[in-house]
Image (cartoon, rainbow, N blue to C red):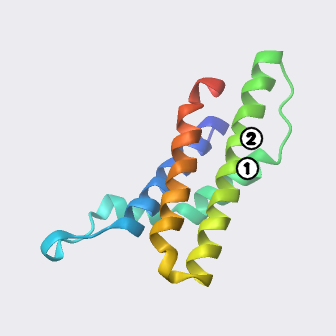
Amino acid sequence: MTFRGALEALLEALDATVRLARWQGEGGEAIPEPLQKSAAQLQDRLGSANRLAAGKFPGAPAVVASSDAIRSAIVALDTAFVAYRKQVETRPAERDAAAMALDAEVGRIRLDAHRWE
């Protein structure tokens, strides 16, 4: 998996996790299987992204800048997910607020996508 691919896969899994946290199936509507599968892969994707982010990528200045931007994004997403889990585990009544904060960080990272393209 490429460094950028790891970040995109992580964003997808975090987005699915947020959507599941907010899921309010109308009339007992089941959660779509692709959404469940993506959220279930979060830990693996987070681990892969963190392992890649821990590495050094030498090369041309543009490549190093792109790698640094991806590394920063992965660290920010990891931090946001840890904060989300902590808030959900210690204050379950604040699950919606925790999901909103995680969703905001995912959105912020997506807005910065130009930095690693």
Residue 76 rendering spot, x and y as whole percentages: 69, 49
Do the CB atoms of the residues marked 1 and 2 lie less than 8 Å apart?
yes
Give the labeled residue for mark 2: 71
- Give how far across and how far down residue 10 sits, in percent: 56, 50
Q: Residue furthest left?
A: 27
User: Where is residue 62 shown, x and y percent of the image?
Assistant: 76, 17
Mark 2 surroundings within 10 Å by alpha-carbon count, few (fewer than 14), some (14 through 19), many (20 or more): many
Residue shown at 57%/82% (left/top)?
Answer: 91
What element does badge 2 sit on? helix
Image quarter in which the N terminus is found: top right
Label 1: state its secondary structure.
Answer: helix
In this picture, residue 95 sits left or right of residue 66 = left
Front-most of 85 and 34? Answer: 85
Q: Amino acid at mark 1?
A: Val
Residue appearing at x 57%, y 40% in the figure:
108
Residue occupying image coordinates x 76% and y 53%: 51
Considering depth in this image, is 116 or 80 the residue closer to the camera?
A: 80
Q: Nearer the viewer, residue 114 or 45?
A: 114
Q: Is residue 73 above or below residue 102?
A: above
Q: Which mark is residue 75?
A: 1
